[in-house]
Amino acid sequence: MTRVRVDEDIRPLSEFRAGVAKFVKQIHETRRPMVLTQRGRGVAVLVDVHEYEKMQERLEVLEEVYRAEEQIANGAGISHEDAKSRILSKLAQ
């Protein structure tokens, strides 16, 4: 996902309400998130649906990595050689 451009992608909620279609089009075309503010404070972030799906996929991978790290830290991991042996044996079947 492309980073937020402060001059283009941070808008007051009232401005968003007045031009929803325009802002949705901008988000879709630029693939950049838009930060909505209320009384000068960030209250919401709008993200293109495809960018959101990519973020979800990345988060799932990261969660798997964190789970694996916890398992290794708790002694539940196996050596590289053992893992390689198991995979090669399953592929041979």
Image (cartoon, helix red, strand yellow):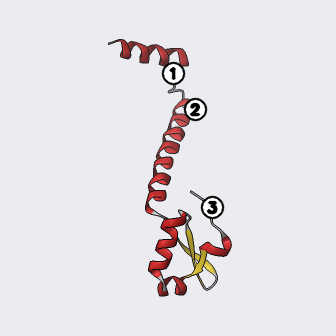
Check disc 2 and report the residue beneath it: 73
Q: Position of residue 31 (x, y in %)?
A: 53, 62
**Nearest-to-viewer mark from 3 and 2:** 3
SS at circle 1: loop
- Say left or right for 17 vs 10: left
Q: Residue at x 50, y 49 (%)?
A: 59
**Nearest-to-viewer mark from 3 and 1:** 3
> Could you say which is closer to the camera, residue 30 or residue 67?
30
Residue 3, label in figure: 3
Q: As shown in the figure, which amino acid type bears the numbered disc 1?
A: Ile
Check disc 1 and report the residue beneath it: 78
Q: Residue at x 48, y 52 (%)?
A: 54
Vertical relation: 46 (above or below) 14: above
- Of pointers 3 and 1, the one earlier in the residue sequence: 3
SS at circle 2: helix
- Say left or right for 39 vs 28: right
Vertical relation: 77 (above or below) 31: above
**Mark 1 nearby-residue class (10 Å; few <14, some 14–19, many ≥20):** few
